Amino acid sequence: MVRAQRNLRDAYPTWSQQRVDETAHGCFRHMFQLGAEFIHTPRLITRDSAIQQITFTNMRDSVRALLSDRPVLLISGHIGNWELVGYAIAMLGFDMAAVYRPLDLRGIDAWVREGREAKGLHLLDKFGAARSVPACIAQGLPIGLVADQSGGDRGYFTPFFGRLTSTYKIVALTAMQYGATIVCGNARRLRPDEADPPGVWQGTHAEPARAAKTLARIDIANTMRYAVEIHDVFGPKDWEGNPDAPYYISARFRRALESMVRSAPEQYFWMHRIWRSRPAHERMGKPFPEALEAKLRNLPWLSSTDVDGLIACSNTDAANLHVLQKM
C-alpha cells in the first residue's frame, strides 16, 4: 500500500492525500476482483456471450491492421483486465499469441493454458520468447505483450508521467525487425453506474434477476463489464527517417500506456516498482546527456516545457537516488 501511495503522489502531484489514498485502495480492490474474474473468464467469455461483458470501441484502425499482411504487436499494461484484451481479439475471430510468465504452481498453470488456448489464445513462455515469437509471426499470428513494467537499467528511458522510466527494448527492436504495426489498447472495467460507451459490438448485460440464480453471477457476470479501448496504432511509416527509431517507438507506446492509466488510475498496479531503475547519468552523478535531451526534443508530442520538466525531474531523482532504489 505504501509503495502504491508513493507512486500515485509522484504521478499526480496536484492530488489531495485523500484522493491518493482512495485510488490506492481502489487499486487493491481491482486486483482482488481480477483474481475472481480470471477464474470465471473461460466460462463467461465465449464467442456467443462476449458482447454481454465487452464493448468494442474505436476498433477500425486496429482491425485493419489485423486484416493486413503486416505483423502486429498488441501492447497493453497492467491496467484494467489485460488478459481480456487477448480474449477480445479471439472473439473478433483472430487467433493470437501472448507472451506470459508461467505460474509457479504447475497444475494451475496447466489449467490456465488449457482454458485460454481453447479460445484461440496461444500462450508463449516469456523465457523462450526469443524462439517462439519469430515462429508465431511467421504464422501470421498477432503477438500480445504486457509491456509496462521496468525494463531495467539497460532499457530505453522514456517519459512516463513526467519522469524518465525504463522501457523494454524488445518491443521496438521486434517491430523494426519485422516491420510490424503496433496496436496499443486495454480493457477498462466500466463503473457500475457507467453506461456502455458507443461501440461496434455491444449487447445487453445479464439482468439482475437472471444473475441472482447463482452467487457467481451476482458477483461476476453483472460486474465484469469492460470496454476495449484503443489508444494508439502506428507502424513503420511513423518512424521511418527518425534519427533514433527504437527510442521513438518505445516512447510512443509508453505514452499510450500512460494514456491507458489516466483513463482509470484506480485500475493500475501502482505497487509495481515503476521508477526504481534509473538512467546511467543519474547513477553516475553526471549531467543530463545532450544526446538524450535531443531524443526527447525530437518527440513531436512533447513541448519544450515538457522536456525542461523531465530534465529537472531527472536532476531531482539523481539527488535522491538512494530513495528511488529502495522503492
Image (cartoon, rainbow, N blue to C red):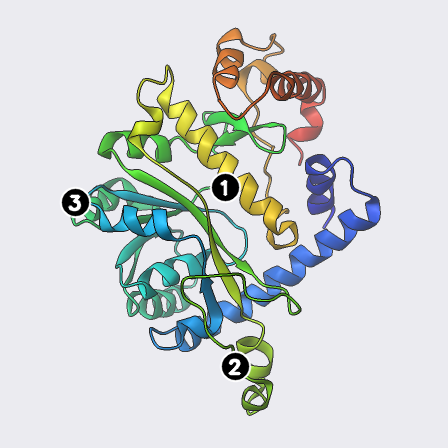
Residue 125 in view: no
Q: Amino acid at mark 3?
A: Ala
Q: CA distance from mark 3 to mark 1?
A: 26 Å
> Residue 18 placed where, x, y %?
83, 50
Asked if disc 2 and disc 3 are in contact, CB closer than 8 Å, the reply is no
Q: Earlier in the sequence, mark 3 or mark 1?
A: 3
Q: Mark 1 and mark 2 in contact (Cβ < 8 Å)?
A: no
State the CA–CA distance, disc 2 to disc 1.
33 Å
| Residue at x 30% of width, y 48% of height | 143
**As displayed, is residue 243 above or below residue 251?**
above
Q: Which one is earlier in the sequence, the residue at label 2 or at label 1?
A: 1
Q: Amino acid at mark 2?
A: Ala
Q: How crowded is the residue under tag 1: few (<14 C-alpha within 10 Å), some, or many (20+)? A: many
Q: Which residue is mark 3?
A: 138
Residue 116 position in % (x across, y down): 34, 66
Placement of 201 over or under 169, stated as above or below: below
The kind of secondary structure element at disc 2 is loop
Q: Is residue 145 left or right of residue 1?
A: left
Label ID, residue 148: 1
In the rendered image of this protein, does residue 261 appear above or below residue 244? below
